[in-house]
């Protein structure tokens, strides 16, 4: 796994991203707690998450086209600067006591738009830094980085809100973008993507990327499982604060600890998976099924220690599914389509969340958080199991070619 860190440009990029993502998770904790403080409403939290992730549903696929058309390093500089500006703007509103649910929603939409353009470019930029042979190592390292940051950032966000208030946590996040901006301005890719052979329309480029993903069976199965995981299994941003507040009756530091447990489980999975880079379909689907089972168990748990342990297992299982999916897509996709296919990955992991988050908030608001967890977890298990069984059946009994005509 550490082979990719021997590439200096990737090592600097990885380190800068680590600092930035720590700040990002601190903001996640701060904003979720701010919304609950203002409204005491699961539905309001689900709505804010909907506004934050809805742009990914709308713009992730066009973002993939842009990532295949323009230099990815320059695009990342622009998106990282926009994310820093969003954190500063929201921090100022909170500090001046001007932040209402309306302003939080508007800036959450801005955040989601920047992430929709940033995500495909960020995923597609990695092979430019390390080369195709080191892609599995780099994907594993990026998962270590992301989940180390989630573990640290979850706890740091809770402590920052307790010590400096919500605005302090937001300004802290803004400051963490400075290292990655400096790194992106300095580094150069050793394996830049070739320029597009011909400039087609955006719609034609979109069709080409979607057509490849849907025609290629191994890619299509990854897409199907990711759709289920993104829609039903990965609503932690809504689920964890509701678990902390309404099921376990914890304050913001307890919420931060729950987020850290989630990150710790994911980090353990990233380190373990670095030893096995085969990225098999079996591993992908097993991770998704276990993730669904954990959601059901969380819906039944009112014990703080048990919920900490379950979130660690959920983080582990979710990361097994997502890192396997990411690696398979990176290795299966040709260079000229990489941005668009990774746009599909970003769409399914982030763009389906607005629908899932809103539905989760509605169920939790009208019934209970536990009911929402059980419903989402059971549906995840059943749906992924059906995909798995269908795959095994078609592999065992492939359809005979038609002899008609």
Image (cartoon, rainbow, N blue to C red):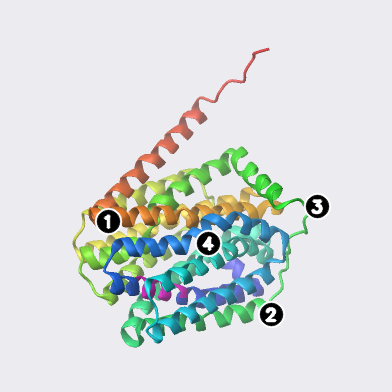
Residue interval drawn in magenta: 24-32
- Looking at the image, is mark 2 or mark 3 nearer the viewer? 3
Q: How many marks?
A: 4
Are the residues tagged 2 and 4 within 8 Å (C-beta)? no
Q: Secondary structure at mark 3?
A: loop
The earlier-in-sequence mark between 4 and 3 is 4
Relative side of 7 to 113, left or right: right
The answer to whether 183 is drawn above or below residue 2 in the figure is below
Residue drawn at point x = 52 percent, y = 50 percent:
279
The answer to whether 14 is drawn above or below residue 233 in the figure is below
Relative side of 293 to 331, left or right: left
What residue would you read off at disc 1? 364
Q: Give the spatial CA distance, label 2 vs label 3.
A: 30 Å
The earlier-in-sequence mark between 1 and 3 is 3
The earlier-in-sequence mark between 2 and 3 is 2
Image mark for residue 179: none
Image mark for residue 198: 3
Q: Secondary structure at mark 2?
A: helix
Residue drawn at point x = 40 percent, y = 87 percent:
96
Characterize the magenta stretch by its predominant secondary structure.
helix
Quadrant (top left/top right/bottom left/bottom right) for the C terminus? top right
Q: Secondary structure at mark 4?
A: helix
Q: Nearer the viewer, residue 338 or 351?
A: 351
| Quarter holding residue 267 | bottom left
The earlier-in-sequence mark between 2 and 4 is 4
What residue would you read off at disc 2? 186
Question: Within 10 angstroms of label 3, few (less than 14), some, or many (20 or more) residues?
Answer: few
Question: Within 10 angstroms of label 4, few (less than 14), some, or many (20 or more) residues?
Answer: many
């Amino acid at each position: 796994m550490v082979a990719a860190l021997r590439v200096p440009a990737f090592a600097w990029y990885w380190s800068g991203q680590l600092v930035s993502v720590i700040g990002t998770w601190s903001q996640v904790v701060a904003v979720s707690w701010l919304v609950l403080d203002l409204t005491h409403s699961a539905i309001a939290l689900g709505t804010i998450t909907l506004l934050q992730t809805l742009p990914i549903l709308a713009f992730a696929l066009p973002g993939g086209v842009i990532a295949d058309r323009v230099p990815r390093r320059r695009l990342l500089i622009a998106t990282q600067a926009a994310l820093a500006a969003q954190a500063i703007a929201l921090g100022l509103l909170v500090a001046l006591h001007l932040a209402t649910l309306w302003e939080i929603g508007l800036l959450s939409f801005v955040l989601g738009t920047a992430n929709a353009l940033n995500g495909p470019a960020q995923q597609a930029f990695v092979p430019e830094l390390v080369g195709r042979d080191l892609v599995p190592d780099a994907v594993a390292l990026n998962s270590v980085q992301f989940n180390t940051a989630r573990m640290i950032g979850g706890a740091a966000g809770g402590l920052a809100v307790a010590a400096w208030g919500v605005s302090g946590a937001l300004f802290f996040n803004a400051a963490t973008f400075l290292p990655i901006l400096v790194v992106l301005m300095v580094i150069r890719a050793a394996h830049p993507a070739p320029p597009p052979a011909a400039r087609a329309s955006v719609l034609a480029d979109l069709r080409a990327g979607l057509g490849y993903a849907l025609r290629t069976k191994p890619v299509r199965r990854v897409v199907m499982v990711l759709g289920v995981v993104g829609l039903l299994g990965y609503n932690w941003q809504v689920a964890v604060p509701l678990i902390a507040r309404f099921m376990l009756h914890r304050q913001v530091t307890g919420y931060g600890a729950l987020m850290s447990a989630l990150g710790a489980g994911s980090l353990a999975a990233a380190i373990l998976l670095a030893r096995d880079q085969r990225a098999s379909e079996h591993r992908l689907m097993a991770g998704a099924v276990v993730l669904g089972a954990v959601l059901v168990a969380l819906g039944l748990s009112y014990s703080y220690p048990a919920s900490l342990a379950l979130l660690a297992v959920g983080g582990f299982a979710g990361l097994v599914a997502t890192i396997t999916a990411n690696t398979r897509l990176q290795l299966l996709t040709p260079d000229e389509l990489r941005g668009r296919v990774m746009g599909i990955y970003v769409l399914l992991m982030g763009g389906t969340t607005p629908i899932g988050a809103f539905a989760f908030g509605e169920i939790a608001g009208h019934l209970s958080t536990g009911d929402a967890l059980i419903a989402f977890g059971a549906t995840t298990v059943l749906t992924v199991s059906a995909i798995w069984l269908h795959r095994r059946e078609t592999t065992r009994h492939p359809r005979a070619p038609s002899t008609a005509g």
